[in-house]
Amino acid sequence: MASDETTQSAAAPTVTQSAGDGRSTSRGERREGSTTAGTNGEACGTSGGTATLVQSWLLIGAVALVVMTVNALSSIDDNPMNPAWQPWVWEVSSATVIVGLVWIPWLAYRRATPEGGLLTPRFWLFHGLALLAFSAVHVAGFVAVRKLVYGAVGEQYDFGPLERVFPYELRKDLLTYAIFISVFWGVDVLRRRRHVAPSEPATFDILDGQRVIRVSLDQIVAITSAGNYVEFLLEDGRRPLMRAPLTAVEGDLGERGFVRTHRSWLVNRSRVTGLKPEGSGDWSVELGAVEVPLSRRFKAALGQLKDG
C-alpha cells in the first residue's frame, strides 16, 4: 500500500517510489443495569453491528497484509537501486493507517447502507463526505509516519506537490473505500442469512429490567426508540422496554420481516393493515389500531411494505 511520490535523501540522490498502494423522546424511569438481548437471547450489539465490524476488520486486515507484502517485494524487484527498506516503510505506513481508519467508512455504512438505495442523495452525501475524510486522514497519517521514519535514519521524505499527489491518492482511496463498503455489506448479508437458519425458533428475548420476556416475532407489532431504550408494542397491549439502541434491534430483526420506516420506528411487515399518504412524500403505516410514521427519507421501506 504505497504512493507515487518522490522521496529525497539528504545524503543520497533522489529516488522515485513505485506505484501500487494496496489498500427522541424518553418514556418512564431509566432502568439501570439491564443489558440488551437479541433473537434467542443473543446480545444485540454482538449479533448485530459489532459482529459485522469485527469480522470485516479481520478480513480487511488479512487482505491488507498480503497486498502490503506483495507490493513491497515487487517494488524492491522493480527498483533494485533504491534502499530496500523504503518500500517497506511506504507499504506498512499506508496499510497500517488504512486498517486503523476502518471506522470512517463503517460509520457511513451504518448511516446509509446499500439496502437503502445506491442512487439516493442520502447515500452519496454520507459516503462522499466519508470518502474525503478517509482519504485526507489516510494521506496525513502515512506522510507523518514516513517523515518520522526517514528522519530517524537521517533522511528526508518528500510527499510531492499536494495539488498533484492528493487527487492521485484520492482515486486509489475511492477503490479502497468501495472495497470496505462491499466487505461490510457482504459480511452483513452472510451473517444475517446464518442468523435466520430454518432451525432457528422465531422468537425474540426482550430484557425488560431484570426480566426476560420471550415473545414470538409475530406478536411484535412495532418497535420505537425511547431515549436510551426501545419500546416494544406487543399485540396483547404490553409495552416492555429494553435498554438498547434501535439500530442494534434492527440488526437482529431487519432480515426477519421488520422494516425501518422512521429514525425512531421499526414495524413488523406482517402486521401492516394499510398505508396512508400524508403529503410531501410522508406516509402513515396502519398496524390495526396503531399508526406509525413512514418518513420520505425511507423510500425503500415504502416499496417493501407495498410488496407485502
Image (spheres, grey):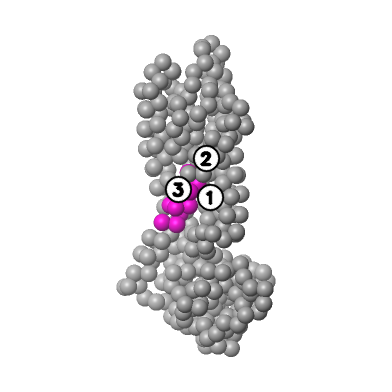
Q: Is residue 154 magenta-colored? A: no
Q: Amino acid at mark 2?
A: Arg
Give the mark nearer the N terminus: 2 vs 1: 1
Q: Secondary structure beneath disc 3? A: helix
* Magenta region, residue range: 176-186
How many other residues sit within 10 Å of disc 1, few (<14), some (14-19) or many (≥20)?
many
Residue 60 location, quadrant: top left
Tell me the CA gap for discs 2 and 1: 16 Å
Q: Residue at x 48, y 52 (%)?
A: 181
**Residue where numbered disc 3 is placed:** 179
Three-letter code, disc 3: Ile
* Magenta stretch, main secondary structure class: helix
Q: Determine whether the residue tagged by mark 1 lies in a helix, strand or loop.
A: helix
Mark closer to the observer (2, 3): 2
Residue 167 point in image, percent of width and height: 57, 36
Q: CA distance from mark 1 to mark 3?
A: 10 Å
> Is residue 182 within the magenta segment?
yes
Is residue 36 visible in the rendered image? The answer is no
Residue plotted at (39% across, 77% down): 202
Q: Which residue is mark 1?
A: 105
Q: Position of residue 53 (x, y in %)?
A: 47, 53
What amino acid type is highlighted by mark number 1? Pro
Q: Are marks 1 and 3 in contact (CB under 8 Å)?
A: no
Give the foreground label among 2 and 1.
Answer: 2
List x then y, in percent, for residue 302. Answer: 54, 74
Which residue lies at the image location 37% right of the left edge and 69% below the top edge?
196
Q: Residue at x 51, y 12 (%)?
A: 13
